[in-house]
């Protein structure tokens, strides 16, 4: 097993390297200039050229890439062109906020999605099933941006039930754990809609698939109660494919909430990524790209390992 | 099978724990406790100009204390005044860091700030500044001339990524100091005479020195920066200044909190309000919602939100015309004939464009020079009133004849298509582009509109210059000399028109170094420039930029000024009792 993991991780190195080459090239090919942000007419051409040299942007792109790569070997992702902070610490600073929102959304998504999937399967063909399937399509299709704004207008602006954004009340006397949960609620619900949609469809399909299996018929034939057959035999097997989905969603935990972060002013990585791309902050963009690529590789590996763990029939070689 | 359940339960638990444990918020940067008393200053002034159209609130009994929440679309980038030029960062550092001189909120003339007074030598080359006594940094250390000298050295240090280096181009030794190869560590023209006196020696007389260079020189504390890398110094995130407001905390992309500096040197007891919170909210709808609900006290709004603000009993709208203007620029190497550029200007109904973009708030602008400026002379240059017949006849004169299909062809007989660019997502410029397209069609000119994401668009404007016409704005400050030179000079960084006029280059140079720097003497050069610009038309001024800011009516003391803007006297704002 250890050898397998080691080999998989080693295989990931050329993949990640390839990704960085392509990403670096694409970022530099895209029109734009990190120094364009100094739109101030008081900033002279000579100053801009000096800053360009200071940031290493006067070097040919391949040289810039090699310099970036050399730093990466000592886990130095460079410094942001804009804030001058180390990229690694900028990312570390925002990961907790993003994880909190993403995990809350994932938990909601899992809970409601699995429940809805099971109900849809059990009540197959009924109006309820149709309703859940309809929601699954809509939940996936409706942009979070729009949904978020609509919810802000309804629940924050008109009803005053929930805050319209931010992570906590900025007036110190109001801040606290409850206040924090109150701020988390709306962005988490909005982000969870696509999870709910995905999970409910998966679970429904899998449950319907599993209940047709021989061992379920056997369980019924043994005279087991319907509930026992369903929860002990059917549901557990039906949930196995969810592991693949969860493994594949690891990168989405860090990037999937970007839109909600933007709409709800949630200070996470998604907003940082959007800002970095718009301001052509190459080191931050590369850092985030590298991290999400690594998470995709790691997520795939984890789901393969978890597969072997939960289903002894699968052997990893 | 048990493992499946276990895994599933584990995942759900993990997620639940994560949402129930909201302590994982990003770390806010918290200011270190001041070790002693500081003396105060005032907040920085906005360099743009306002004229409030709103009635100032009636004065009630001013009281100390209270919080103001100021909404912004973007978070600050870095809280060192010399590493960035973005507006959100300047909202903070102008409140924390102070310059030696500021500009008068009404006239734009230099006024004392950290320097009580100054002398200028007869040859106009040496400026001596006498600093205010007993000014303290927020950490209690005394402020001296050494801090000022250090700040200039830090900006000019070739290793420092400061966009402000060129402010000191006329200071003796500044160019050598910036040159990495020369390894100079001291700028000869910046001399500390004693703790409270500092001298700047220039290589040539430079009129904008007092109103452009000095107000931008916000002083950094030498004792916290000396010997460190200025780019990465920790106080770039938790600034220590001499200003009216002390830094308290910064939760990135969420908010920055400043608290009153009770020991400010300029106003006994410090600013009237206790706390200033700068809150990042990315969406205009949300800003408007929070202003209405009272969660936010001050924020910029869009023209379409004006009716809602006017309905509200708690909100006061300030329409502040700036010195800035929206324009349509030409690439004169593509649209080469000035008669064609003039025809296009006549064909544009700029009043309709301003009406569409700003709902009638912005007057049409005819000049680059701000009409409120000392250099402006009304009627001294052609204003190009909307005149379709004139536009058509000028195009005919230029040889751009109407073809069989009603569209014009250029002198070589090739059908004309003009490519007009703007930045995508800017609904006002989109409106302007559509109106211009229609109005130019009315005189037989075919226009294709293109848009591009902001940074890529700037790259086009600054580097490739691949366009016939484009839309953008200039944000000018009261001393527009250096700006104007950078924009219209042949070698200017912002010569987006690819325009070269020797007379203009000479006038823009001469206006900066007029002996005695009298406004009347400088004005004649700017008037000459304006006449040539209006004749040659590298760009067409469209309308004044008016900023729309809403402030909750519970605040008093709000007193917008043409140059100082809305917040020049922010330290005097208070909450009505």
Image (spheres, rainbow, N blue to C red):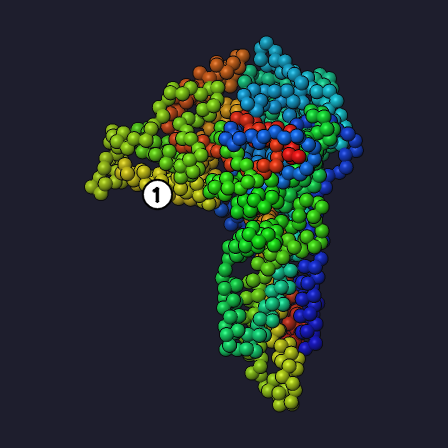
Measured as percent of width and height from the top left, residue B537 is found at 37, 28
In the image, what residue occupies the spot 56% across and 20% down? Answer: B109
In the image, what residue occupies the spot 42% across and 21% down? Answer: B529
Between B195 and A266, the one nearer to me in the picture: A266
Measured as percent of width and height from the top left, residue B2 is found at 70, 76
Dot 1 falls on which chain? B
Q: Is residue B495 visible?
A: yes
**Neighbour class for label 1 at 10 Å: few (<14), some, many (≥20)?**
few
Up the image or down, B49 lies above or below A58; here it is above
Up the image or down, B115 lies above or below A182; here it is above
Between A284 and B548, the one nearer to me in the picture: B548
Secondary-structure class at tag 1: strand
Up the image or down, A216 lies above or below B17; here it is below
Count of all numbered marks drawn on residues in the image: 1
Measured as percent of width and height from the top left, residue A275 is found at 56, 46
Q: Give the position of the N terminus of chain B as an image quadrant.
A: bottom right
Between B462 and A228, the one nearer to me in the picture: A228
Q: Quadrant of residue B172?
A: top right
Q: Is residue B81 visible?
A: no
Pick out the residue farthest to the right.
Answer: B35
Measured as percent of width and height from the top left, residue A235 is found at 62, 77
Q: Give the position of the C terminus of chain B as an image quadrant.
A: top right
Viewed as shown, does residue B155 lie left or right of A135?
A: right
In the image, what residue occupies the spot 31% across and 38% down? Answer: B440
Q: Which residue is mark 1?
A: B448
Between A213 and A111, the one nearer to me in the picture: A111
Pick out the residue farthest to the left.
Answer: B404
In the image, what residue occupies the spot 44% across and 33% down? Answer: B362
Q: Quadrant of residue A216?
A: bottom right
Q: Quadrant of residue B505?
A: top left
């Amino acid at each position: 097993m250890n050898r397998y993991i080691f080999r998989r991780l080693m295989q990931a190195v050329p993949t990640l390297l390839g990704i960085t080459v392509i990403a670096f090239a694409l970022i530099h090919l895209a029109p734009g200039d990190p120094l364009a942000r100094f739109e101030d007419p008081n900033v002279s051409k000579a100053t801009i050229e000096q800053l360009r040299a200071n940031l290493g942007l006067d070097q040919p792109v391949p040289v810039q890439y090699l310099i970036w790569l050399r730093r990466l070997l000592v886990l130095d992702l460079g410094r942001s062109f804009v804030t001058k902070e180390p990229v690694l610490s900028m990312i570390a600073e925002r990961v907790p906020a993003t994880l909190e929102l993403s995990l809350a959304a994932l938990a909601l998504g899992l809970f409601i999605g699995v429940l809805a999937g099971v109900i849809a399967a059990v009540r197959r063909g009924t109006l309820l099933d149709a309703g859940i399937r309809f929601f699954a399509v809509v939940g996936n299709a409706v942009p979070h941006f729009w949904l978020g704004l609509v919810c802000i207008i309804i629940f924050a602006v008109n009803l005053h039930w929930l805050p319209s954004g931010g992570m906590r009340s900025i007036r110190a006397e109001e801040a606290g754990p409850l206040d924090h949960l109150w701020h988390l609620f709306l962005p988490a619900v909005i982000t969870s809609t696509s999870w709910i949609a995905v999970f409910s469809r998966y679970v429904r399909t899998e449950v319907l698939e599993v209940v047709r299996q021989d061992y379920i018929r056997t369980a019924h034939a043994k005279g087991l109660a319907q509930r026992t057959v369903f929860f002990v035999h059917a549901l557990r097997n039906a949930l196995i494919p969810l592991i693949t989905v969860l493994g594949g969603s690891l990168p989405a935990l860090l990037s999937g909430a970007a839109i909600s972060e933007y709409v709800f002013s949630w200070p996470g990585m998604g907003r940082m990524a959007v800002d970095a791309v718009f301001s052509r902050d190459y080191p931050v963009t590369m850092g985030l790209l590298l991290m999400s690529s690594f998470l995709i590789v790691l997520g795939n590996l984890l789901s393969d390992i978890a597969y072997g763990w939960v289903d002894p029939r699968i052997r990893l070689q | 099978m048990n493992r499946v359940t276990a895994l599933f339960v584990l995942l759900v638990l993990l997620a639940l724990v994560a949402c129930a444990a909201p302590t994982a918020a990003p770390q806010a940067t918290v200011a270190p406790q001041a070790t002693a008393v500081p003396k105060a200053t005032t907040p920085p002034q906005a360099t743009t100009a306002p004229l409030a159209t709103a009635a100032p609130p009636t004065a009630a009994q001013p009281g100390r204390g209270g919080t103001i929440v100021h909404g912004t679309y973007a978070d600050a980038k870095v809280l060192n005044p010399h590493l960035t030029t973005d507006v959100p960062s300047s909202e903070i550092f102008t409140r924390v860091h102070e310059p030696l001189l500021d500009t008068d909120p009404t006239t734009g003339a230099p006024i004392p700030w950290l320097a009580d007074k100054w002398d200028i030598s007869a040859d106009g080359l040496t400026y001596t500044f006498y600093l205010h006594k007993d000014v303290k940094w927020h950490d209690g250390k005394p402020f001296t001339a050494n801090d000022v000298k250090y700040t200039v050295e830090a900006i000019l240090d070739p290793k420092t990524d400061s966009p402000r280096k060129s402010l000191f181009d006329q200071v003796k030794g500044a160019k050598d100091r910036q040159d990495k190869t020369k390894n100079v560590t001291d700028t000869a023209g910046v001399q500390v005479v004693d703790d409270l006196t500092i001298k700047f020696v220039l290589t040539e007389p430079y009129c904008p020195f007092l109103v452009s260079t000095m107000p931008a020189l916000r002083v950094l504390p030498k004792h916290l920066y000396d010997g460190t890398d200025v780019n990465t110094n920790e106080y770039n995130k938790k600034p220590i200044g001499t200003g009216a407001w002390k830094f308290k905390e910064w939760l990135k992309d969420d908010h920055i909190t400043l608290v009153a500096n009770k020991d400010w040197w300029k106003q006994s007891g410090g600013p009237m309000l206790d706390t200033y919170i700068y809150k990042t909210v990315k969406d205009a709808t949300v800003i408007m919602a929070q202003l209405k609900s009272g969660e936010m006290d001050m924020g910029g709004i869009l023209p379409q939100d004006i009716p809602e603000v006017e309905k509200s009993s708690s909100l006061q709208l300030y329409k502040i015309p700036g010195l800035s203007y929206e324009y349509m620029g030409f690439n004169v190497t593509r649209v080469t004939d000035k008669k064609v550029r003039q025809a296009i200007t006549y064909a544009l109904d700029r009043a309709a464009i301003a009406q569409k973009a700003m709902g009638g708030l912005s007057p049409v602008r005819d000049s680059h020079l701000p009409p409120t400026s000392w250099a402006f002379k009304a009627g001294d240059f052609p204003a190009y009133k909307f005149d379709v017949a004139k536009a058509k006849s000028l195009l005919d004169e230029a040889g751009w004849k109407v073809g069989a299909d009603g569209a014009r062809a250029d002198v070589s007989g090739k059908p004309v298509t003009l490519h007009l660019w703007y930045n995508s997502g800017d609904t006002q410029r989109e409106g302007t582009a559509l109106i211009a397209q229609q109005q130019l069609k009315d005189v037989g000119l075919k226009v294709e509109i293109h848009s591009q994401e902001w940074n890529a668009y700037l790259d086009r404007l600054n580097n490739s210059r691949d366009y016939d016409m484009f839309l953008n704005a200039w944000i000018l400050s009261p001393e527009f000399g250096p700006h104007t030179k950078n924009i219209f000079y042949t070698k200017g960084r912002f010569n987006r028109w690819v325009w070269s006029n020797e007379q203009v280059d000479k006038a823009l140079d001469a206006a900066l170094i007029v002996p005695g720097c009298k406004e009347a003497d400088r004005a004649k050069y700017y008037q000459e420039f304006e006449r040539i610009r209006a004749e040659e038309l590298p760009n067409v001024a469209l309308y004044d930029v008016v900023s729309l800011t809403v402030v909750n009516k519970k605040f008093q003391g709000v007193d917008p000024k043409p140059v100082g803007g809305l917040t020049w006297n922010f330290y005097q704002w208070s909450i009505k009792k």
